[in-house]
Protein backbone atom coordinates (compact mmCIF):
# COMPACT_ATOMS: atom_id res chain seq x y z
CA UNK A 1 0.00 0.00 0.00
CA UNK A 2 2.82 2.41 0.91
CA UNK A 3 4.43 2.25 -2.53
CA UNK A 4 1.27 2.08 -4.63
CA UNK A 5 0.51 4.94 -6.99
CA UNK A 6 -2.48 6.99 -5.83
CA UNK A 7 -3.88 10.52 -5.69
CA UNK A 8 -4.16 13.29 -3.11
CA UNK A 9 -6.31 16.33 -3.91
CA UNK A 10 -6.50 14.96 -7.49
CA UNK A 11 -2.69 15.10 -7.69
CA UNK A 12 -1.12 11.89 -8.96
CA UNK A 13 1.61 10.62 -6.62
CA UNK A 14 4.03 7.69 -7.00
CA UNK A 15 3.53 6.53 -3.41
CA UNK A 16 2.23 7.65 -0.02
CA UNK A 17 5.52 9.12 1.25
CA UNK A 18 5.64 12.90 1.58
CA UNK A 19 8.56 15.12 2.47
CA UNK A 20 7.14 17.31 5.23
CA UNK A 21 7.86 21.04 5.20
CA UNK A 22 11.44 21.72 6.28
CA UNK A 23 13.18 25.08 6.60
CA UNK A 24 16.17 24.70 4.29
CA UNK A 25 17.86 28.07 4.84
CA UNK A 26 18.74 28.28 1.16
CA UNK A 27 16.62 31.13 -0.18
CA UNK A 28 18.38 34.05 -1.83
CA UNK A 29 18.42 37.57 -0.35
CA UNK A 30 14.96 38.27 -1.81
CA UNK A 31 13.44 35.09 -0.41
CA UNK A 32 13.34 33.28 -3.75
CA UNK A 33 14.72 29.75 -4.19
CA UNK A 34 18.46 29.75 -4.79
CA UNK A 35 20.13 27.41 -7.27
CA UNK A 36 21.29 25.29 -4.32
CA UNK A 37 17.71 24.96 -3.08
CA UNK A 38 16.47 23.99 -6.55
CA UNK A 39 19.21 21.36 -6.79
CA UNK A 40 18.26 20.02 -3.35
CA UNK A 41 14.62 19.65 -4.36
CA UNK A 42 15.57 18.02 -7.64
CA UNK A 43 17.56 15.42 -5.69
CA UNK A 44 14.44 14.68 -3.63
CA UNK A 45 12.26 14.52 -6.74
CA UNK A 46 14.62 12.09 -8.48
CA UNK A 47 14.49 9.72 -5.52
CA UNK A 48 11.02 8.18 -5.88
CA UNK A 49 9.28 10.48 -3.39
CA UNK A 50 5.52 10.82 -3.63
CA UNK A 51 5.20 14.55 -2.94
CA UNK A 52 7.30 17.43 -1.62
CA UNK A 53 6.08 20.19 0.69
CA UNK A 54 8.47 23.14 0.68
CA UNK A 55 9.88 24.86 3.71
CA UNK A 56 7.67 27.69 4.93
CA UNK A 57 7.43 30.84 2.84
CA UNK A 58 6.51 34.12 4.52
CA UNK A 59 3.33 35.78 3.23
CA UNK A 60 4.25 39.24 4.52
CA UNK A 61 7.23 41.26 5.71
CA UNK A 62 6.11 41.23 9.34
CA UNK A 63 5.68 37.45 9.25
CA UNK A 64 9.31 36.56 8.49
CA UNK A 65 11.22 34.04 10.60
CA UNK A 66 14.36 34.98 12.56
CA UNK A 67 16.04 31.98 10.93
CA UNK A 68 18.35 33.00 8.08
CA UNK A 69 17.38 32.78 4.41
CA UNK A 70 13.71 31.93 4.80
CA UNK A 71 11.67 31.72 1.61
CA UNK A 72 9.27 34.61 0.97
CA UNK A 73 6.29 34.95 -1.33
CA UNK A 74 4.97 38.47 -0.70
CA UNK A 75 6.42 40.09 -3.82
CA UNK A 76 5.82 39.33 -7.50
CA UNK A 77 9.53 39.59 -8.24
CA UNK A 78 10.15 36.08 -6.82
CA UNK A 79 7.63 34.30 -9.07
CA UNK A 80 10.14 33.60 -11.85
CA UNK A 81 12.57 31.77 -9.59
CA UNK A 82 9.75 29.79 -7.97
CA UNK A 83 8.63 28.82 -11.50
CA UNK A 84 12.13 27.49 -12.14
CA UNK A 85 11.78 25.39 -8.97
CA UNK A 86 8.38 23.94 -9.87
CA UNK A 87 9.46 23.18 -13.45
CA UNK A 88 12.52 21.34 -12.17
CA UNK A 89 10.54 19.18 -9.73
CA UNK A 90 7.74 18.51 -12.21
CA UNK A 91 10.19 17.12 -14.76
CA UNK A 92 10.48 14.14 -12.42
CA UNK A 93 6.72 13.63 -12.06
CA UNK A 94 6.48 14.85 -8.46
CA UNK A 95 3.86 17.32 -7.15
CA UNK A 96 5.21 20.33 -5.27
CA UNK A 97 3.23 22.04 -2.50
CA UNK A 98 4.18 25.48 -1.17
CA UNK A 99 3.83 25.89 2.58
CA UNK A 100 2.85 29.48 3.39
CA UNK A 101 3.13 30.99 6.84
CA UNK A 102 3.16 34.03 9.07
CA UNK A 103 5.43 33.65 12.11
CA UNK A 104 3.35 35.88 14.39
CA UNK A 105 4.91 36.17 17.85
CA UNK A 106 7.34 33.38 16.96
CA UNK A 107 9.88 35.82 15.59
CA UNK A 108 11.67 38.90 16.86
CA UNK A 109 11.01 42.55 16.16
CA UNK A 110 14.70 42.83 15.24
CA UNK A 111 14.29 40.16 12.52
CA UNK A 112 11.34 41.91 10.86
CA UNK A 113 12.37 45.53 11.45
CA UNK A 114 9.16 46.45 13.26
CA UNK A 115 7.12 45.33 16.24
CA UNK A 116 5.94 41.78 15.79
CA UNK A 117 2.21 41.00 15.76
CA UNK A 118 -0.04 38.29 17.20
CA UNK A 119 -3.68 37.63 18.12
CA UNK A 120 -2.71 38.45 21.72
CA UNK A 121 0.45 39.58 23.46
CA UNK A 122 1.45 36.27 25.05
CA UNK A 123 5.06 35.90 26.16
CA UNK A 124 7.20 33.64 23.96
CA UNK A 125 10.07 31.92 25.80
CA UNK A 126 12.54 32.22 22.90
CA UNK A 127 11.39 35.58 21.51
CA UNK A 128 10.25 37.57 24.57
CA UNK A 129 9.87 41.00 22.96
CA UNK A 130 6.34 42.33 23.13
CA UNK A 131 3.90 41.50 20.34
CA UNK A 132 1.34 44.04 19.11
CA UNK A 133 -2.22 42.72 19.25
CA UNK A 134 -3.63 42.77 15.74
CA UNK A 135 -6.51 45.11 14.95
CA UNK A 136 -9.42 43.83 12.89
CA UNK A 137 -8.21 45.76 9.83
CA UNK A 138 -4.76 44.21 10.24
CA UNK A 139 -6.31 40.74 10.47
CA UNK A 140 -8.11 41.31 7.17
CA UNK A 141 -4.78 42.47 5.75
CA UNK A 142 -3.13 39.20 6.78
CA UNK A 143 -5.98 37.23 5.19
CA UNK A 144 -5.30 39.15 1.97
CA UNK A 145 -1.59 38.37 2.32
CA UNK A 146 -2.25 34.62 2.43
CA UNK A 147 -4.59 34.84 -0.55
CA UNK A 148 -2.14 36.97 -2.57
CA UNK A 149 0.68 34.55 -1.75
CA UNK A 150 -1.47 31.71 -3.08
CA UNK A 151 -2.15 33.61 -6.31
CA UNK A 152 1.62 33.94 -6.77
CA UNK A 153 2.05 30.25 -5.96
CA UNK A 154 -0.41 29.33 -8.71
CA UNK A 155 1.39 31.59 -11.22
CA UNK A 156 4.66 29.92 -10.24
CA UNK A 157 3.25 26.47 -10.99
CA UNK A 158 2.76 24.97 -7.53
CA UNK A 159 0.26 22.13 -7.28
CA UNK A 160 -1.23 23.18 -3.93
CA UNK A 161 -0.56 25.41 -0.93
CA UNK A 162 -0.31 24.30 2.66
CA UNK A 163 -1.20 26.74 5.44
CA UNK A 164 1.10 26.44 8.43
CA UNK A 165 -1.47 26.25 11.19
CA UNK A 166 0.74 24.49 13.73
CA UNK A 167 3.87 24.77 15.87
CA UNK A 168 2.99 28.12 17.44
CA UNK A 169 2.94 30.25 14.29
CA UNK A 170 0.31 32.92 13.74
CA UNK A 171 -2.57 30.72 12.53
CA UNK A 172 -1.92 28.23 15.33
CA UNK A 173 -2.07 31.08 17.83
CA UNK A 174 -5.47 32.13 16.49
CA UNK A 175 -6.79 28.56 16.73
CA UNK A 176 -5.43 27.94 20.23
CA UNK A 177 -7.07 29.56 23.24
CA UNK A 178 -3.62 29.68 24.83
CA UNK A 179 -2.29 32.06 22.18
CA UNK A 180 -5.64 33.70 21.46
CA UNK A 181 -7.07 35.57 24.44
CA UNK A 182 -9.27 37.96 22.50
CA UNK A 183 -12.93 38.59 23.29
CA UNK A 184 -13.99 39.95 19.90
CA UNK A 185 -15.03 38.28 16.63
CA UNK A 186 -11.60 36.65 16.34
CA UNK A 187 -11.31 35.01 19.75
CA UNK A 188 -13.15 33.30 22.57
CA UNK A 189 -15.40 30.66 20.98
CA UNK A 190 -14.02 27.99 18.67
CA UNK A 191 -16.08 29.51 15.86
CA UNK A 192 -14.36 32.87 16.34
CA UNK A 193 -10.88 31.35 16.68
CA UNK A 194 -11.33 29.47 13.39
CA UNK A 195 -12.60 32.52 11.50
CA UNK A 196 -9.27 33.75 10.13
CA UNK A 197 -8.30 30.33 8.76
CA UNK A 198 -11.73 29.72 7.26
CA UNK A 199 -11.64 33.08 5.50
CA UNK A 200 -8.14 32.40 4.18
CA UNK A 201 -9.24 29.05 2.76
CA UNK A 202 -12.35 30.54 1.18
CA UNK A 203 -10.35 33.46 -0.22
CA UNK A 204 -7.78 31.16 -1.83
CA UNK A 205 -10.56 29.06 -3.33
CA UNK A 206 -12.18 32.16 -4.81
CA UNK A 207 -8.96 33.52 -6.34
CA UNK A 208 -7.19 30.32 -7.45
CA UNK A 209 -7.78 26.73 -8.51
CA UNK A 210 -5.24 25.40 -6.02
CA UNK A 211 -6.03 22.73 -3.43
CA UNK A 212 -5.56 24.10 0.09
CA UNK A 213 -3.92 21.90 2.72
CA UNK A 214 -3.18 22.74 6.34
CA UNK A 215 -0.68 21.57 8.93
CA UNK A 216 -2.05 21.50 12.48
CA UNK A 217 -0.73 20.75 15.94
CA UNK A 218 -3.45 18.45 17.27
CA UNK A 219 -2.10 19.12 20.77
CA UNK A 220 0.17 21.96 21.85
CA UNK A 221 0.79 21.06 25.51
CA UNK A 222 -0.22 24.52 26.67
CA UNK A 223 -2.74 25.11 29.44
CA UNK A 224 -6.01 25.93 27.74
CA UNK A 225 -4.46 25.32 24.33
CA UNK A 226 -5.02 22.83 21.55
CA UNK A 227 -6.15 19.31 22.46
CA UNK A 228 -7.49 16.46 20.40
CA UNK A 229 -11.15 17.29 21.11
CA UNK A 230 -10.83 20.90 19.97
CA UNK A 231 -8.68 19.80 17.01
CA UNK A 232 -11.38 17.43 15.78
CA UNK A 233 -13.93 20.25 15.81
CA UNK A 234 -11.48 22.61 14.10
CA UNK A 235 -10.79 20.05 11.38
CA UNK A 236 -14.51 19.59 10.77
CA UNK A 237 -14.92 23.34 10.32
CA UNK A 238 -11.89 23.63 8.04
CA UNK A 239 -13.10 20.78 5.85
CA UNK A 240 -16.44 22.55 5.52
CA UNK A 241 -14.60 25.75 4.56
CA UNK A 242 -12.89 23.90 1.70
CA UNK A 243 -9.67 22.46 3.14
CA UNK A 244 -8.46 19.58 0.94
CA UNK A 245 -5.95 17.76 3.19
CA UNK A 246 -4.78 17.91 6.81
CA UNK A 247 -1.30 17.13 8.11
CA UNK A 248 -1.32 16.18 11.80
CA UNK A 249 1.60 17.27 13.98
CA UNK A 250 1.91 18.54 17.57
CA UNK A 251 3.59 21.10 19.81
CA UNK A 252 5.14 24.52 19.34
CA UNK A 253 8.63 25.87 18.67
CA UNK A 254 9.04 27.03 22.29
CA UNK A 255 8.30 23.44 23.28
CA UNK A 256 10.38 22.07 20.41
CA UNK A 257 11.37 18.77 21.99
CA UNK A 258 7.70 17.79 21.82
CA UNK A 259 7.42 18.49 18.10
CA UNK A 260 10.85 17.02 17.26
CA UNK A 261 11.45 14.36 19.90
CA UNK A 262 14.78 13.00 21.05
CA UNK A 263 16.26 11.05 23.97
CA UNK A 264 18.37 14.02 25.05
CA UNK A 265 18.64 17.72 24.32
CA UNK A 266 21.71 18.18 22.04
CA UNK A 267 23.50 20.53 24.40
CA UNK A 268 26.64 21.05 22.33
CA UNK A 269 24.43 22.15 19.44
CA UNK A 270 22.45 24.43 21.77
CA UNK A 271 25.66 26.14 22.84
CA UNK A 272 26.86 26.54 19.29
CA UNK A 273 23.70 27.62 17.50
CA UNK A 274 21.08 28.96 19.94
CA UNK A 275 21.19 32.41 21.47
CA UNK A 276 22.12 33.54 24.03
CA UNK A 277 24.29 30.46 24.54
CA UNK A 278 25.97 30.82 21.14
CA UNK A 279 27.33 34.23 22.19
CA UNK A 280 28.73 33.13 25.54
CA UNK A 281 32.43 33.95 26.05
CA UNK A 282 34.63 30.88 25.60
CA UNK A 283 35.52 30.74 29.28
CA UNK A 284 31.85 30.75 30.33
CA UNK A 285 31.12 28.19 27.65
CA UNK A 286 33.75 25.84 29.08
CA UNK A 287 31.94 25.94 32.41
CA UNK A 288 28.32 26.06 31.27
CA UNK A 289 28.37 23.31 28.63
CA UNK A 290 29.71 20.54 30.93
CA UNK A 291 27.20 21.61 33.58
CA UNK A 292 24.39 21.43 31.04
CA UNK A 293 25.52 17.97 29.95
CA UNK A 294 25.44 16.80 33.58
CA UNK A 295 21.82 17.80 34.10
CA UNK A 296 20.69 16.84 30.59
CA UNK A 297 19.74 13.24 31.50
CA UNK A 298 17.55 14.60 34.30
CA UNK A 299 15.44 16.70 31.92
CA UNK A 300 12.20 14.89 31.23
CA UNK A 301 11.63 14.48 27.50
CA UNK A 302 8.25 13.80 25.87
CA UNK A 303 7.40 10.19 25.10
CA UNK A 304 6.92 8.19 22.97
CA UNK A 305 9.76 9.00 20.58
CA UNK A 306 8.21 7.16 17.64
CA UNK A 307 4.86 7.45 15.84
CA UNK A 308 3.75 10.05 18.37
CA UNK A 309 1.01 11.72 16.31
CA UNK A 310 -0.53 8.56 14.91
CA UNK A 311 -3.32 8.11 17.43
CA UNK A 312 -4.45 11.72 17.08
CA UNK A 313 -4.32 11.42 13.29
CA UNK A 314 -6.55 8.34 13.51
CA UNK A 315 -9.09 10.17 15.66
CA UNK A 316 -9.20 13.11 13.26
CA UNK A 317 -9.46 10.77 10.26
CA UNK A 318 -12.61 9.21 11.73
CA UNK A 319 -14.26 12.63 11.82
CA UNK A 320 -13.41 14.08 8.39
CA UNK A 321 -13.41 12.84 4.82
CA UNK A 322 -10.34 14.69 3.47
CA UNK A 323 -6.95 12.90 3.29
CA UNK A 324 -4.98 12.80 6.52
CA UNK A 325 -1.18 13.07 6.50
CA UNK A 326 0.69 12.14 9.67
CA UNK A 327 4.18 13.25 10.68
CA UNK A 328 6.31 12.63 13.76
CA UNK A 329 8.90 9.94 14.48
CA UNK A 330 7.74 7.55 11.76
CA UNK A 331 10.88 5.82 10.53
CA UNK A 332 10.09 2.13 9.94
CA UNK A 333 8.43 0.74 6.81
CA UNK A 334 6.51 -1.76 8.95
CA UNK A 335 5.04 1.08 11.02
CA UNK A 336 4.14 3.04 7.90
CA UNK A 337 2.34 0.06 6.40
CA UNK A 338 0.47 -0.59 9.67
CA UNK A 339 -0.62 3.05 9.97
CA UNK A 340 -2.09 2.93 6.48
CA UNK A 341 -3.63 -0.54 6.86
CA UNK A 342 -5.28 0.37 10.18
CA UNK A 343 -6.78 3.53 8.68
CA UNK A 344 -4.93 5.90 11.02
CA UNK A 345 -3.78 8.08 8.09
CA UNK A 346 -3.70 8.18 4.30
CA UNK A 347 -0.15 9.45 3.82
CA UNK A 348 3.11 9.41 5.79
CA UNK A 349 5.27 12.52 5.97
CA UNK A 350 8.80 12.88 7.31
CA UNK A 351 11.13 15.80 7.95
CA UNK A 352 14.35 14.85 9.76
CA UNK A 353 14.81 11.54 7.92
CA UNK A 354 15.00 13.39 4.58
CA UNK A 355 17.61 15.78 5.99
CA UNK A 356 19.69 12.72 6.84
CA UNK A 357 18.90 10.77 3.64
CA UNK A 358 17.48 12.84 0.75
CA UNK A 359 17.06 9.65 -1.30
CA UNK A 360 15.25 7.83 1.52
CA UNK A 361 12.06 7.09 -0.41
CA UNK A 362 14.02 5.22 -3.07
CA UNK A 363 16.00 3.32 -0.41
CA UNK A 364 12.82 2.24 1.37
CA UNK A 365 11.23 1.14 -1.89
CA UNK A 366 14.34 -0.91 -2.68
CA UNK A 367 14.29 -2.79 0.61
CA UNK A 368 15.78 -0.61 3.35
CA UNK A 369 13.54 -1.23 6.35
CA UNK A 370 13.87 2.06 8.22
CA UNK A 371 15.35 5.55 8.09
CA UNK A 372 18.93 6.09 9.20
CA UNK A 373 18.02 9.24 11.20
CA UNK A 374 18.81 8.84 14.92
CA UNK A 375 16.57 11.76 15.99
CA UNK A 376 19.48 13.60 17.59
CA UNK A 377 17.89 16.99 16.73
CA UNK A 378 21.17 18.66 15.80
CA UNK A 379 19.54 19.66 12.51
CA UNK A 380 16.84 21.53 14.42
CA UNK A 381 19.48 23.82 15.94
CA UNK A 382 21.74 24.24 12.91
CA UNK A 383 18.90 26.11 11.18
CA UNK A 384 19.21 29.00 13.63
CA UNK A 385 22.54 30.01 12.11
CA UNK A 386 23.18 28.00 8.92
CA UNK A 387 21.44 26.10 6.12
CA UNK A 388 19.80 22.92 7.37
CA UNK A 389 22.04 19.86 7.38
CA UNK A 390 22.47 16.57 9.20
CA UNK A 391 25.20 16.39 11.85
CA UNK A 392 24.22 12.87 12.95
CA UNK A 393 24.75 13.58 16.63
CA UNK A 394 28.22 15.06 16.51
CA UNK A 395 29.78 18.51 16.15
CA UNK A 396 33.39 17.94 15.19
CA UNK A 397 34.77 21.37 15.99
CA UNK A 398 33.49 21.84 19.53
CA UNK A 399 30.60 23.88 20.83
CA UNK A 400 31.70 27.34 19.74
CA UNK A 401 33.68 28.62 16.78
Image: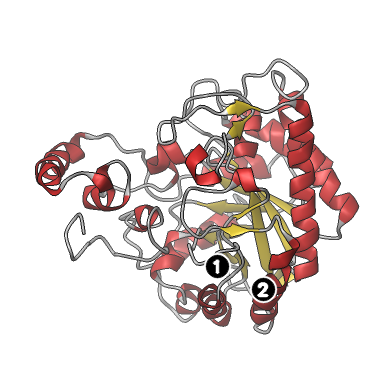
The picture quadrant where one finds residue 292 is top left
For disc 2, the neighbor class at 10 Å (few under 14, some 14 to 19, many from 20) is: some
Regarding residue 16, the answer to whether it shows in the image is no
- Element carrying mark 1: loop
> Within the image, what quadrant is residue 211 found in?
bottom right
From the top left corner, tell me how far across and down residue 52 is, in percent. 60, 67
Q: Residue furthest top?
A: 183
CB contact under 8 Å: marks 2 and 1:
yes
Residue 81 is labelled as: 2
Which sits earlier in the primary sequence, circle 2 or circle 1? 1
- Residue drawn 67% across and 78% down? 84
In this rendering, the answer to whether 96 lies above or below 110 is below
Quadrant location of the N terminus?
bottom right
Residue 225 or residue 320, whichever sits in front: 225
Is residue 36 among what the camera can see?
A: yes
Name which residue lies at 41% across and 72% down.
357
What residue does disc 1 label? 28
Quadrant where the C terminus lies? bottom left
Residue at the right extreme, as displayed: 206
Q: Is residue 333 left or right of residue 382?
A: right
- Name which residue lies at 21% across and 44% down: 280
- At a point 57% along the width and 76% down the height, the residue shown is 38
Amino acid sequence: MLFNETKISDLAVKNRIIRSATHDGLADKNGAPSDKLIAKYEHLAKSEIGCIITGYAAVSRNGVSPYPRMMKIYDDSVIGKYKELTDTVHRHGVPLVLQIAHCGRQTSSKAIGQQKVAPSNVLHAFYPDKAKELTENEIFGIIDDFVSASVRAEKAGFDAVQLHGGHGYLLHDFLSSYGNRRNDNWGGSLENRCRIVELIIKGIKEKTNLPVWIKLSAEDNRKGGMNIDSSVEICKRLEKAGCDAIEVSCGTVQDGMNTMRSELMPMDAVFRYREPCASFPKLLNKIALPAANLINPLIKQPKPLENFNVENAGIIKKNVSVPIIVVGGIHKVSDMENILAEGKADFISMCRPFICEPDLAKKLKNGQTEAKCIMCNYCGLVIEKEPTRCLYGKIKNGANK
